[in-house]
Amino acid sequence: MYYRLGQTITGYDFIFDTSDNSCELINHNELVELGVDFRSIKYTPFDANKLRVLYSIDTSKWSEVKLVTYVVKPDTESNIYVELSLQIVPVEGMVNEYLYDKKRKILPQFINNCVIVMEIKVMGMTRDSDLAYLSERYITADSPFYNLVFDCFDVTMTGVGISIPIEMYFYTLKLARNHDLYGMSRIYANWLIHKLSFVNLSANVNGNKLVKIEGWYI
C-alpha cells in the first residue's frame, strides 16, 4: 500500500511503501499521470522521546549526520563537489521560533518540536584551486530543494535542503549505510546527481555524470 505522508512547497509528494518501508520523493503531476493508487494520511509527528530512547538521537540540540561527498561533472563546467547531510533542528531555542524557507513558509514538523532537513552543499574549485561553497548559485525553481535559513540558538545559517518525514530520514540512512548513492538520488527524484541544477552557471547543471565518490562518512 502506498501512502502520501506530505507534500513539499515545490510540488513533490513523499510516498511511503508499506511493503518494504521505503519512502520516495515523487513529482505530484507524474503520480497523477501514472495513475498511482495512494492514500493521503494526516501525518502525526514522530515522538521525540521515542526517537531518543530507540535511536539515541538527542532532539534537544541541533544534530547533523554527514553522509557522503561526491563529484559530478556537467557537460560545460568543471567538476562540482557535493556533500549530503541529515540535520535535526529543534524548534525550541530558535530565535524566531521557526525554521523557514525562501518563501517565508513554515516547514512541516515531522518530529515533535523538530524539523528534519536533508541538506545538500555544493562546492566548486576557485582560481586558487581551493574548494568554495557556491552559496550564490541558487537552485533552479523546478528542484524539490529550496534555500533555507536556520535561526537557532542565536546563530543564523543558510543552506539548501528539504524538510523530510522521519520515514524518509530512516530510509536515507539505510541507503547511505549500504553506500548506495544512486539509490539515494533515486528516492530524491534523481536530483542528487543527474538533475542537479543551479542557476547562474554558464550553463545549468543538468545531465550530470558521477565522476567519483570522495568518501562516505557512515
Image (cartoon, grey):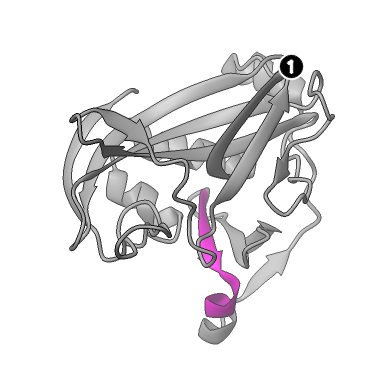
Instruction: Tell me if residue 24 is in the magenta stretch.
Output: yes
Q: Position of residue 22 (x, y in %)?
A: 49, 50
- What residue is shown with label 1? 154
On the image, the x and y values in percent for residue 37 come to 61, 76
Q: Is residue 196 magenta?
A: no
Q: Is residue 198 above or below residue 165?
A: below
Residue found at x 63% / y 68%: 11
Secondary structure under badge 1? loop
Question: 67 and 179: which one is in front?
Answer: 67
Residue furthest right as drawn: 97
Label total for image: 1
Left of 81 or right of it: where is 105? right
Q: Which quadrant of the structure image shows residue 4?
A: bottom right
Q: Position of residue 177 (x, y in %)?
A: 34, 31
> In which quarter of the view is residue 131 placed?
top left
Q: Quadrant of residue 159?
A: top right
Q: Position of 161 compared to 46: left or right? A: left
For the residue marked with disc 1, what is the amino acid? Answer: Asp
User: In this picture, is 117 found above or below 23?
Assistant: above
73 displayed left or right of 42: left
Q: Quadrant of the N terminus?
A: bottom right
| Magenta-colored span | 22-31
Decide whether the magenta segment is chiefly helix, strand or loop.
Answer: strand
**For residue 184, side relative to residue 150 (left or right):** left
| Residue drawn at the location 31% of the way across and 54% of the way down | 193
Instruction: Name, please, the residue furthest toward the front.
Output: 127
Quick check: 183 above or below 57? Answer: below
Q: Residue at x 59, y 81 (%)?
A: 32
Q: Position of residue 96 (x, y in %)?
A: 83, 30
